[in-house]
Image (cartoon, helix red, strand yellow):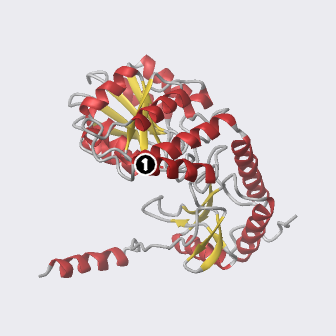
């Protein structure tokens, strides 16, 4: 049998299981609207929370850096790929996260892999939230530590698991800061208390928290006033660029430089990416307008949908999952939104549990009042027609 024949058979199974995925093509810059497969749509599913991904100031910074330094960094950080721009961005990241130091990775995915494959060792235990991001799960798989999973945000179970596992050398609590499919925030105050009580360390993946939660957008540490032992982040969401990072103590960063294989054996990100991310962080530090707008718009969507009778999940974040139920129904709901010019995907099993299919909305600072009105009105009409909400609700 040819390899293609074998793979085609596998794909048939993928399709039968309803798990077959295809691309949608974005034909313009990542703004509030985008031409998607030829049709202009209002985008309510992007991670470009602060609207920085198509900001001219970031593009100008990248252009200048390309002219001066070229397009590729040409080596790993430990060979020829460590430039003034990488160091400048790391200093900026450490100051943004208010930690001693920071280290760039090529992506958030690789930062998670690097941390989890190098820090928890055989004889250690990883305690992991059941809804953790795939990159944390993959990192855990690469670690020789034992693993135990606790129900989403369930601190009683976490405490029980910690208490029962004091024989391990070290215990690592691993969690998303803001959960990508649920918009929930990890309860770091209680986690810190448990970590201190049971001699454990906290590793937080703040991919959706960075730039979004906390008084000035510094992430979940700022939101709770609690420091985690290892903070992982990405430059690809609110920061609007690409690349990942780890922030923490100088010793942590020194250790990762020497032991994280996804750091050591990879070419560093281009200087132009560092320059645009640096500019984004400067904007985030000096102008809180984007963040305030993001918060106010997210709150409007949350309260608007709740008032219409929708069942929404999550904390005060721009990630707003609207529960629909059955997978087919959620799929149809998303299609009908698209017919009204709104692009927001249905999230179905196995990404979420059976019967918990949803429309995952994300709000960005770029959305306008009329976009929110159109979104709410469309949800109202479709929701009523599909009996997701009761008929007695009136749109006001
Ligand atoms: C997006 C995401 C990542 C991966 O970050 P990239 O920089 O895109 O590789 C990691 N963790 C979480 C929770 C994410 O949402």
Residue 157 visible to the viewer: no
Residue 53: percent from left, percent from top:
57, 54
Q: Nearer the viewer, residue 125 or 142?
A: 142
Q: In which quarter of the image is the C terminus?
A: bottom right
Q: Does the residue labelled 1 lie within 8 Å of ligand 1?
A: yes
Decide: is 151 above or below 367: above
Residue 58: percent from left, percent from top:
57, 49
Task: List the single residue furthest toward the left.
Answer: 1
From the viewer's perspective, tell me whether residue 13 is left or right of residue 246. Answer: left
Decide: is 317 above or below 15: above
Residue 316 visible to the viewer: yes
Identify the residue at image location x=39%, y=71%: 19
Identify the residue at image location x=41%, y=22%: 249
Q: Nearer the viewer, residue 25 or 198?
A: 25
Residue 301: percent from left, percent from top:
73, 55
**Secondary element at image label 1:** loop
Give residue 366's quadrant in the image.
Answer: bottom right
From the viewer's perspective, tell me whether residue 113 is left or right of residue 215. Answer: left
Decide: is 309 above or below 280: below
Q: Quadrant of the N terminus?
A: bottom left
Q: Name the residue beneath numbered marker 1.
A: 133
Task: List the single residue furthest toward the front.
Answer: 68
Q: Which of 331 and 77 is in front in this view?
A: 77
Identify the residue at image location x=76%, y=59%: 368
Q: Which of 162 and 73 is in front in this view?
A: 73
Residue 335: percent from left, percent from top:
60, 77
Decide: is 112 above or below 357: above
């Amino acid at each position: 049998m040819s390899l293609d024949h074998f793979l085609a058979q596998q794909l048939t199974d993928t399709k039968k299981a309803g798990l077959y995925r295809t691309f949608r093509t974005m034909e313009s810059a990542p703004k509030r609207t985008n031409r998607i497969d030829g049709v202009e749509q209002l985008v309510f599913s992007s991670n470009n929370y602060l609207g920085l991904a198509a900001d001219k100031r970031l593009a100008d910074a990248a252009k200048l850096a390309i002219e001066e330094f070229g397009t590729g960094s040409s080596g790993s950080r430990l060979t020829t790929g460590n430039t003034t721009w990488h160091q400048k961005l790391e200093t900026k990241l450490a100051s943004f996260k208010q930690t001693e130091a920071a280290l760039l990775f090529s992506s958030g995915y690789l930062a998670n892999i690097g941390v989890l494959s190098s820090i928890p060792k055989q004889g250690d235990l990883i305690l992991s939230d059941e809804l953790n991001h795939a990159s944390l799960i993959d990192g855990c798989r690469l670690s020789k530590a034992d693993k135990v999973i606790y129900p989403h945000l369930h601190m009683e179970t976490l405490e029980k698991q910690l208490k029962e596992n004091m024989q391990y050398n070290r215990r690592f609590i691993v969690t998303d800061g803001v959960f990508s499919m649920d918009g929930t925030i990890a309860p770091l105050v209680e986690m810190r208390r448990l970590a201190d009580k049971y001699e454990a360390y906290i590793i937080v993946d703040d991919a959706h928290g960075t730039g979004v939660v906390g008084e000035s957008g510094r992430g979940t540490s700022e939101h709770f006033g609690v420091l985690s032992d290892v903070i992982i982040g990405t430059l690809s969401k609110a920061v609007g660029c690409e690349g990942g990072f780890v922030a923490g103590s100088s010793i942590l960063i020194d250790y990762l430089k020497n032991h994280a294989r996804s750091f050591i054996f990879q070419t560093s990100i281009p200087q132009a990416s560092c320059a645009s991310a640096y500019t984004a962080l400067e904007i985030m530090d000096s102008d809180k307008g984007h963040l305030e707008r993001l918060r106010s718009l997210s709150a409007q969507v949350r309260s608007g949908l709740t008032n219409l009778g929708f069942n929404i999940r999550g904390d005060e974040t721009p990630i707003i999952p609207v529960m629909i139920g059955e997978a087919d129904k959620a799929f149809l709901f998303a299609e009908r939104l698209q017919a009204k010019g709104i692009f927001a995907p249905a999230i179905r099993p196995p990404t979420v549990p059976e019967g918990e299919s949803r429309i995952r909305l994300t709000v960005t600072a770029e959305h306008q009042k009329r976009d929110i009105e159109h979104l709410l009105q469309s949800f109202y009409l479709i929701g009523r027609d599909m009996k997701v909400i009761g008929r007695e609700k009136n749109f006001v």
